[in-house]
Image (tube, rainbow, N blue to C red):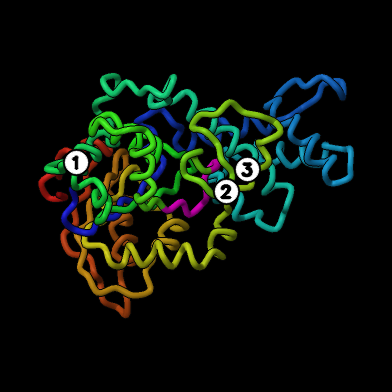
Amino acid sequence: MFKRKTVFIVGAGASKEVGLPVGDELKNTIAGKLNIRFDDGYSQSSGDKKIAEALKLIVVERGGRDINPLCQAGRSIASAMPQAISIDNFLQTHANDADIVLMGKLGIAASILEAERSSTICTKDHVMDFGAHPNIWYNTFCKMLAENVQLGDLETIFDNVAFVTFNYDRCIEHFVSHWLENYFRISADHAQNLTRKLKVFHPYGQVGRLPWQGGGISVGYGTELSSRTLPQIAGQIRTFTERAENDAMLDEMRDYVANSEQIVYLGFSYGQMNMELLTVPHCSVYKSVFGTVLHMPAPKVTQAQNRVRMSLTTNTQSWVGQQEYLGAEANKLLNDYWYHLV
């Protein structure tokens, strides 16, 4: 169990450990799905067929019949992905183009649900094989969480921990719930009720709420894509501009970061747009900072450290204390700094 208030900042590199795509991989997948073309005007020759079917439903709801403008918007996204830092950056650039934003969200939703379904932690008949993936950070985190915890302590197991994830997937919530059920030998309902207490902030939204979470659009982990539900799922995705307008969520997230004693960055790129969302307006607690910088050259590591420091500076005072950065995957960082963190 974590004795000090700890927040984990999670990026795409962390989900990579269970098979989800990182930046360039996600951009390529989205580009392939949104490059929707019809050779003879009727037979689809490229792009995702479920997205194309969803477009027909969308235009009918709008009182129209022509999906070509939306298809063109999708092709524009596809052609620009090699130039984009990320899909999020591209959608921010074109935030005033409703068709671009819609197509981008459809591409994200379809890609993430597909990736969840093929991930190593996707369950079959509600059973997760923990022996098949023992060396992932999700498992290590849960072991740290459960250290010295008895069954009578379960109601408070998440008291000092929270997540800010910039990923659209639900890997954290999905894995933690199954882990608690199996390790503590409790019912699925009990494990799910406990996991509801884990604070997980999704600044850019997610591909729906898991069925047991309640509220919003309910979508099972790795659910088979449906053209009818895809627009609703895509509606849960938020661009930088849209999410920045959600003051209540951002205030709560930043308050948690500001009041934390430890911040752990896992698989995070320290991109400027995301660091802006993490910048705290006030602070009163010095923080130990731990972060992965896998495959990052020295100049970028230096800039990442500077961005972290600036995000935790108020009125010219930095609240960063100990800093440890490791050029390794998230699981190694948690293992190496286990005794520092718990």
Residue at 36% of width from left, 46% of height from top?
Answer: 10
**x%, y% of residue 177?**
35, 37
What segment carries the magenta color?
Answer: 201-208
**x%, y% of residue 93?**
62, 55
| Circle number at residue 216 | 2
Q: CA distance from mark 1 to mark 3?
A: 39 Å
Is residue 13 in view? no
Looking at the image, which is closer to me, 230 or 307? 230
**x%, y% of residue 149?**
15, 43
> Helix, strand, or loop for circle 2?
loop
Side of 310 relative to 148 (left or right): right
Residue at 34% of width from left, 49% of height from top?
Answer: 198
Q: CA distance from mark 1 to mark 2?
A: 31 Å
| Circle number at residue 151 | 1
What secondary structure characterizes most of the magenta part?
loop
Is residue 197 in view? yes
Q: Is residue 323 above or below residue 222?
A: below
Residue type for callout 1 = Leu
Chain-order first, disc 1 or disc 2: 1
Residue type for callout 2 = Gly
| Circle number at residue 7 | none
Chain-order first, disc 2 or disc 3: 2
